[in-house]
Image: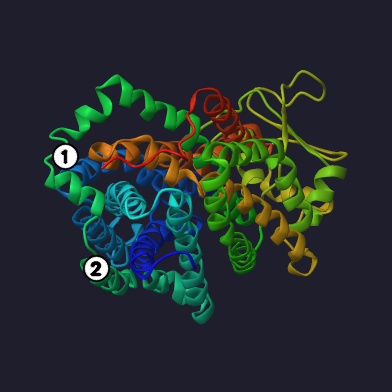
Amino acid sequence: MDDMDKKARQVIFASSLGTVFEWYDFYLYGSLAVFFSGLFFPPGNETAAFLASLAVFGAGFGVRPFGALLFGRLGDLIGRKHTFLVTIVVMGLSTAAVGILPTYEQIGLAAPVLLVVLRLLQGLALGGEYGGAATYVAEHAPDGKRGLYTSFIQTTATLGFFLSLAVILACRSSLSADDFKSWGWRLPFLLSVILLGVSVYIRLRLEESPVFQRMKAHGQTSKSPLRDSFLKWDNARLVWLSLFGATAGQGVVWYTGQFYALFFLTASLRVDYVTAYLVLGAAMLLGTPLFVVFGRLSDRVGRKPIMLAGMLLCALTCVPIFQGLTRAANPALALATERSPVVVSGEDCNFNLFAKPSTPCDRARDTLSKSGVGYTRLDPTGEPRPGAQSVMIRVGEQTLLGFDEVKLREALSAAGYPTAADPERIDHLSVILLLTLLIVYVTLVYGPIAALLVELFPTRIRYTSMSLPYHLGNGWFGGFLPFFSFAIVMHTGDPYSGLWYPIGVAVASFVVGLIFLPETKDRPLED
């Protein structure tokens, strides 16, 4: 930041710090999604509760585009500063409310309902936050440095995620497992009250964007930002191009490299939460400075080539990276899978996301999924046939007819399948390096994107126009990624099949962006 003046540093610091706190609030739930499945959802079906927890996690992302429309319109009408001051208050209060929310054991189905409501409020707030912060910083940046200036905003999502991991880890490490489960999980959410106070104090000291002030003084603000953004073809075309050619691919790369990687370590590879938090935190610390590096580089070579490179690299290497994570984090699981593959065959295997498994085949698949064991599904065409109401499970050379959970677990144990990753056998360095590579892809796609979105749209409708494609790409394509990907895994039995969702979106976004998306780095911002 040597080439920034004092005022620019203040603008970037104030905007970034408040945004870090807002991302912290939003990602607390994601960091505890596996844990929350046992607190707020009906007991008796761990797999369904886990998927329901991921669905609620995604619900917050689902409403982000509506927050973008609501607060984007306000930001283009009344200004950037006041709008993202409102968003942080809504976010802070709804997060703190999670900290006092009764659990399913205390109030039954009202607990998940209230949790969904609070997640929706968080999503609405975040839908207005990012566009305001990115627009505000960019409108303070001189030509030729917008990639650099806005890249500091781009670090805030990862830093907020990192802060949520650090606070949760501190709470879980300082409390007994029973205390954390009973009441300690509430502490990170209640901390939001303090963070809210700091954020509001900082943002009250900011001045309105000079670009917006000049436009307002000349009477050039839009009277209908929504109509001008989405019902006029020239601008609406750019909205959809930026979604399908940039933010959709960026969103799936971001959530694959951070949240899906965390869930894969804990839910699929059975790595203990402390180790998972530490290795992912280390990778994020190593990779975060690259947001600024690639943001600054985009001022020289352009936004498109850097972002498209990140999408393509992720699509080409995601599967081998996650396979490498398996070998490094749980080598016993990798070896057992190779030597003694599991095959499930049954004529009554259903794919029910939330229903309790009832048939023997469904119960066998549910047990394997909960154990982190991948399997292959076959039609029951050979011998021995399990029958319409039964199931055949082959673990290596051993064949089980019918479902008996005790016998299945004994067969898995005999074949070398571990119940959890052995901490002594985890190759921590390899895990951190592989996760860091995923973070590098995140920085490639995310570092330049704020500058690109700001430069695509005119000042009078910029807040509204850039916010919608950003939150559609990140909120819908990215936010639901853990749910979609784990649902695919549970349907197919292949622990890596969930990666085909982000790979498909990244490839599609790469093609659309390469052919249709304009380069923006030399565009001056309109006054």
Instruction: Locate residue 356 relative to residue 200 in the image: left or right.
Output: right
Amino acid under disc 1:
Thr
**Residue 427 relative to residue 218: left or right:** right
Q: Is residue 353 visible?
A: no
State the mark number for residue 200. 2
| Residue placed most toward the observer, 271 or 215 | 215
Quarter of the C terminus within the rendering? top left
Residue drawn where x is 45% and y is 76% of the image: 179
Q: Are marks 1 and 2 in contact (CB under 8 Å)?
A: no
Mark closer to the chain start, 1 or 2? 2
Viewer-proximal residue, 204 or 474? 204
Up-down relation of residue 159 to residue 499 (above or below): below
Residue 340 sits in which quadrant?
A: top right
Residue occupied by mark 1: 221
Comparing 230 with 221, the one in front is 221
* Residue at image point 46% right, 55% down: 30
Task: Answer few, some or many: residues within 10 Å of disc 2's Cα (few below 14, many 20 plus, some between 14 and 19).
Answer: some
Q: Position of residue 23 (x, y in %)?
A: 40, 58
Q: Amino acid at mark 2?
A: Val
Q: How is the image coloured?
A: rainbow
Name the secondary structure under disc 2: helix
Question: 154 or 206: which is nearer to us?
Answer: 206
In the image, is residue 173 above or below residue 455?
below
Q: Which quarter of the figure has residue 500?
A: top right
Give the SS element for disc 1.
loop
Quick check: 261 left or right of 215?
right
* Residue 99 rendering spot, x and y as whole percentages: 32, 67
